[in-house]
Image (cartoon, rainbow, N blue to C red):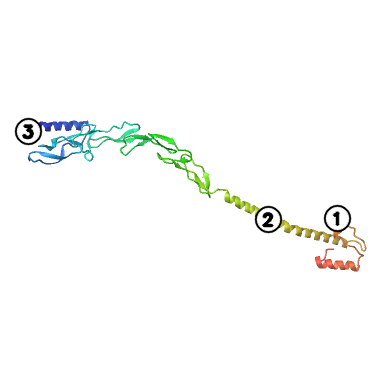
Amino acid sequence: MDLLWRMKLLYGLVLAVLVLAEGHSEESGCMDWENSDNLKDVCCKKCHPGNRLAHECGPDPMLLCAPCENDTFIDANTDTNRMICRRCYQCTGGGMRVKEKCTASRDTVCGCSQGYRCANDKCSHCLKECGKGEQPAGRGKCEPCPPGMYNDKIHQPCVNWTRCTPDHQIIVPGSSSKDVICGLTPHTEPTAKSDADSMVTVILIIFGLLCVTPVATILILEWRRRKLTHKERKQPGGATQTCGPEEVSFCFPQQEHGSSSQSSVESLLSQSIGPLEA
């Protein structure tokens, strides 16, 4: 009986050496055990990580567990069958790559190459990554955003363009990768202000013309009247001023120099417009 267990122990040691040579570096054997009913054997409660249960009970705890062979693993936290090592997952799908290699206690961790992304939490396969202006269409395909929709993120569904409120309008049109930009019309307020300013200017011009024209007319008439009066004073006494057709309204009947009528006219003119220069 002792010879048999010694042979098993030797076999277990040889197997452990072979496993270590193939790449697994976990410690072999049972990690936690208890005495059996016959008090001669021990029963393994928990193997070292990366070891499967080879025998439930035996005289040597080192022979109760055996390490998993290369490309196999056993996860003590998830695997209910402690006696079987499972095959490591192979990252061979389209766009897949090995992110972390398989060990005796953990399965392979896969990732996706650039331009692809994992289809689920376990990354059992990869999907083509849809860029901006596109959306996933199922079965790893992408399609462009329909008219009136956009997507400015990576691998997300397209959404509708923003609808501008009635007091706003589109100042920057949208595209498949950008939303529209709403805002007030840039020329609305300046145009209204310019129209108001123009209207005020026209009113002021009309008002100015209505006020200035009569005053200018009065001043011109007064100037011409003074000019004619000044010429009359320089005429010889008793001569009669002859007026042209254009000056009829500004001429006065001339009397002989020194008459009472002439004196009266000059007196009135002197009081109204002041003395004339000689």
Quadrant that contains the N terminus: top left
- Which label number is shown at residue 2? 3
Q: Residues within 10 Å of mark 1 (few under 14, many from 20)?
A: few
Choose top left, top right, bottom left or bottom right for residue 252: bottom right
Q: Is residue 54 left or right of residue 249?
A: left
Residue 240 x %, y %: 92, 61
Which residue position holds label 2?
203
Residue at 11%, 39% in the rendered image: 42
Can you identify the residue that label 1 sits on? 246
Dot placed on the residue nearer the N-terminal end, 1 or 2: 2
In the visual, does 267 lie left or right of 22? right
What is the distance, in whole Å, between disc 1 and disc 2 at their CAs?
Answer: 35 Å
Q: Nearer the viewer, residue 80 or 209?
A: 80
Q: Work out how far the residue at label 3 is from the one at label 2, CA to CA, in angstroms.
A: 126 Å
Regarding mark 3 in the picture, which secondary structure is present there?
helix
The mark that comes first in sequence, 1 or 3, is 3
Q: Position of residue 16 (x, y in %)?
A: 17, 33
Q: Please indicate whether residue 186 sits to the left or right of residue 74 in the image.
A: right
